[in-house]
Structure formats: C-alpha cells, structure tokens
Image (tube, grey):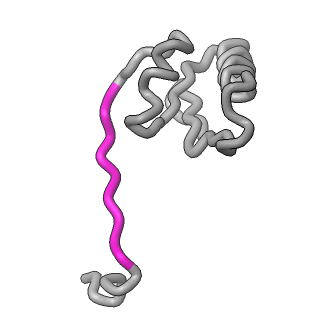
Amino acid sequence: HITDGLMGIYNLCIDEPLRSRGYGRAAVSSLAHWAGERGLALGLQCEVNLVEWYERSQLNALANVDVWTISQKNRANIG
C-alpha cells in the first residue's frame, strides 16, 4: 500500500521451516531498495516477537499499533 510518501508492507511472513535462511532479510532489503528508488519511505508492521529481528535488520520503530478483532459469534451484534 502506498500513500503520502510511504510504502506500507503488511503481513510479510516467512514460513517457519524456511526461516533463518535470509529470505526475510532479502525481501525487506529488496522492498527498501524499490521504495527508495521511488522516493518513498518503507513502513512495516510486525508482531512483538519479531521486534529484535527488525532491529537487527537496521529498521527503527516509528509507532506502536493496537489491533482489534471481533469473534465470529459477536459479528452479528455489531451496531
């Protein structure tokens, strides 16, 4: 998603058996390069357990996001 000079990446996931092979780092590096060539900042969302990985990849935290969900059972009760 691209808006206001920012390319946002959501749900970038590497399947567990394929982790620690450099695929995630290669994907983020390619995306950052692509965005940079177009004058865009790159924004990624990640789960709390991946913060250290992103920090090791030289990304800096910009903000925290709360994510909300509603159960299947309660969907019928919305507004």
Question: Splitting the image into 4 quarters, where does residue 73 fall?
Answer: bottom left
Q: Residue at x 71, y 15 (%)?
A: 33
Q: Is residue 50 magenta?
A: no
* Magenta stretch bounds: 63-71
Relative to 62, is 2 on the left or the right? Answer: right
Q: How many marks?
A: 0
List the single residue furthest toward the bottom. Answer: 76
For residue 24, above or below residue 77: above
Task: Please state the horizontal and vertical placement of residue 76, each as a whole percent of the image.
Answer: 34, 89
Q: Main secondary structure of the magenta part?
A: loop
Say left or right for 41 vs 33: left
Which of 23/9 is in front?
Answer: 23
State whether residue 52 is above or below residue 67: above
Is residue 18 toward the left or the right of residue 13 in the image? right
* Outermost residue, front side: 17
Q: Nearer the viewer, residue 22 or 44?
A: 22
**Is residue 66 a member of the stretch shown in magenta?**
yes
Instruction: Give 30 or 51, whichever is nearer the viewer.
Output: 51
